[in-house]
Amino acid sequence: MQQREKFSSRLGFILISAGCAIGLGNVYRFPIITGAYGGAFFVLIYLVFLLLLGVPVMTAELSVGRGSQRSIATSFEVLERKGQKWHLMKYLGVVGNYLLMMFYTCISGWMVIYFFKYLTGSILQYEGVEALGGAFGAMVSNPGLLIPVTFGVILLCFGACSLGLQKGVEKITKVMMLMLLALILGLGAYSCTLSGAGAGLKFYLVPSLENLRASGVWTVISAAMGQAFFTLSLGMGSIAIFGSYIDRDRSLLGEAVTITALDTFVALMSGLIIFPAYFTFNAGAQGIPADQAGAGFLFTTLSSIFNSMGAGRVIGAFFFLFMMFAAFSTVIAVFENIVSFWLELTKFSRRKIAAINVALMMVLSLPCILSLNVWSNVQIFGKTFMDLEDYMVSNLLLPIGSLCYVLFCTSRYGWGWDRYEAEVNSGLGLKLPRWIRPYMTYVLPVIIAVILVLSAF
């Protein structure tokens, strides 16, 4: 195995780890789900579950990465005791990372296409949700467009990884994340100047029992719990790999809180963009209809709002540039995890590994792309390739992986609490409180198991 690289700075670790967590499912799904399920009360419940679920699981994943100095491909082999089978987790991690990228690179390509549609102004010819829905349908039905754009995303992001951890992944992701933060602050500030901003912000930030009752208390709680769990993309080693690139001068609880806070900040700022705009152009709205709470909201309802603005072309271009950076930061982070598998298991160079995986990922992305058009009638268990890949990652592999990380760190049949606690608490920063041991050992695994069952069925 080649000599392991390290981040050049703590800022690089924080921004890249946050970039991995800040994905499309977070920045567009969080505000849309918030609008569909109660507004401000959903936000409060989400934040509580983020602390109870997201932060503890992240510390487990980071500790395994830093403790082993390996990716998920070999980390459990390094830390487990003789005769244990925790190393079988590597198959879930390796398969999960490839599965995620098989459809995520395609969706990232959508953001690229819509950025250029707004940059050129070609999307402005469509007025209304129905017309924009037809334009979106025409795009996904065109493999001649989707294939080269998706391949371009794959080539660019593996190209960043081929340059190395510091010169490629860290340097490029730092720039993208700082630009992402600047864009979201600018867009949020502009959106808050719109005529309906007051109504949108009230719905988003002021808890209302009426909105909570209208959505259903248990529905809001379960939706908030699910969003809090899935938002950080934990369970497949995509965060653990960055833990393996850092030293022990900072405690992992403090780092997990910082990463989660940055991820949450971006999600909350996304709401400051969407709700003022939505309530401005949907006067009297009581939230976002639940049947609109999907990716299509971006390309239909939200695009119709941009097209109704005087500066819609500019705002739309900046918004999809922001979405593009959010997508690329995740793709580069996961590709770095894939590259790390190969570095640990082969003697190949980074550039050779990147070249092999560019070709491999181009082939693997085709079923998802074609499932939107020429293979749309091909279904497995009633799902298209894209829906099946998404279901397997989001509903099965993420909760199973998270459960394994927590059990491995807290159980005497795994790495064990004492080793986990020592790794997490090593360095300056927040330390694990005493009360968290019984919670993480007995309560948290049950919660994750419940989420697994609910999401699977």
Image (cartoon, rainbow, N blue to C red):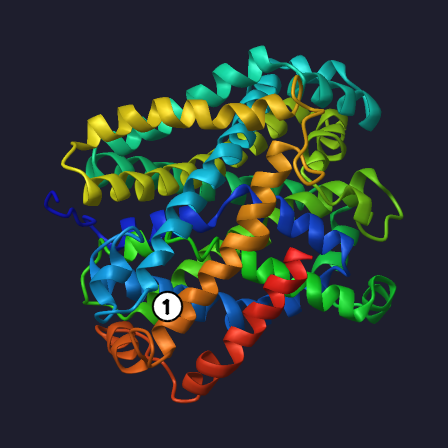
Q: Three-letter amino acid code at disc 1?
A: Ala
Q: Residue at the location (86% across, 48% down)?
A: 285
376 in relation to 148, above or below: below
Say if residue 153 shows up in the picture: no
Indicate the secondary structure of the residue bearing disc 1. Answer: helix
164 vs 286, left or right, is left
90 in relation to 414, above or below: above
Residue extending farthest to the top is 144
Between residue 261 and residue 365, name the one nearer to us. Answer: 365
Q: Residue at the location (18% across, 61% down)?
A: 247
How many labels, in total? 1
Q: Residue at the location (81% across, 44% down)?
A: 291
Between residue 164 and residue 175, name the one nearer to us. Answer: 164
Which residue does the numbered mark 1 point to in the structure image?
A: 60
Where residue 254 appears, as percent x and y from the top left, is 34, 69
| Quadrant assignment, res 309 | top right
Q: Quadrant of the C terminus?
A: bottom right
298 in relation to 53, above or below: above
Say if residue 429 shows up in the picture: yes
Between residue 5 and residue 65, name the one nearer to us. Answer: 65
Q: Quadrant of the N terminus?
A: top left
Where residue 143 appears, as percent x and y from the top left, is 59, 15
264 vs 385, left or right, is left
